[in-house]
Image (tube, rainbow, N blue to C red):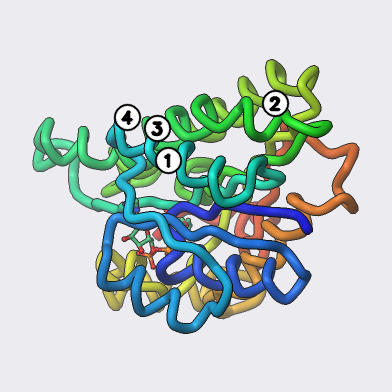
Amino acid sequence: MKSALITGGARGIGFATAQGLMADGWQVAILDRDSDALAEALAELPGAIGLDVDVSIPNDVLRAVAEVAEAFGRLDGLVNNAGVADFGPIRDTTYDRWQRVMRTNLDGPFLMTQAFTDLLAADGGGAVVNITSISGLRASTLRVAYGTSKAALAQLTLQQAAELGELGIRVNAVAPGPVATKLAMAVHSPEIIAAYHDALPLNRYGKEEEIAAAITFLLSDKASFITGQILAADGGFEAVGIGLP
Ligand code: NAD
């Protein structure tokens, strides 16, 4: 049975990914720093294991490696999905706010993939999917920290793909368009919501399971010759080249 670890798996896109992988027969571990949400999620994912971990804390990440090694002995898939959003003008973005975003969105995937490389390389290799964003593909006002973190994560994806391929580890990213999760609804104003509906070719927000489907594909053997790609699951945002609202 294949095994996967999903960061930020207690809700939103990460939780839907856990559900999708379990439906495909994978053994799943979800990791989250919100212990209440983690307990609620585990109640809905019978058989999954939970790791109460913050991906931006190096010692926490090492503890996660030890727990996954003990539970699974190896790892076939790692989804670096945990993320935080903070929208605001450059002049209001304090260094604390900037660092809070970078620590989870960029340092987390760096630390996690580095720490899990040996487990992913065991028994012939594995796959990593980093969750970036359309906010990392285009510049806009309000997204100085969030957009920069996701653009850097896209480059980290390419660096990891270039270097880890020889170990049999594929590394790709999924760049979601808007999905009405807790993270998005905390920063999407009514104007942003209306603008997305109006401008996206599909004229709607995506669903968590639609992003999860792209992630599970990239983890699966169907994607065995795909590495170093950023797959936009975005309702057509990139195709028509609209500006971010
Ligand atoms: P969400 O807030 O519903 O879920 C994110 C989860 O990550 C939460 O359970 C949270 O507790 C956890 N988390 C946050 N920081 C963490 C940390 N340091 N360590 C461990 N866990 C942590 O958000 P979501 O919308 O499902 O977002 C998932 C990913 O998708 C994020 O990386 C986000 O940037 C990206 N994304 C979301 C959208 C969208 O519109 N929702 C669009 C593009 C990209």
* Element on which disc 1 rests: loop
Count of number-bearing discs: 4
Task: Give the spatial CA distance, label 1 vs label 2.
Answer: 25 Å
Sequence-first tag of 3 and 1: 3
Identified at 60% across, 66% down, the residue is 17
**Residue type at tag 2:** Ala
| Residue picked out by circle 1 | 139
Give the x, y percent position of residue 204.
Answer: 56, 79
Sequence-first tag of 1 and 4: 4
Dots 3, 4 in contact, CB < 8 A:
yes
Sequence-first tag of 2 and 4: 4
Q: Is residue 244 above or below residue 67?
A: below
Give the x, y percent position of residue 79.
Answer: 57, 49
Looking at the image, which is closer to me, 53 or 16? 53
**Residue type at tag 4:** Pro
* Element on which disc 3 rests: helix
Task: Give the spatial CA distance, label 1 vs label 4.
Answer: 30 Å
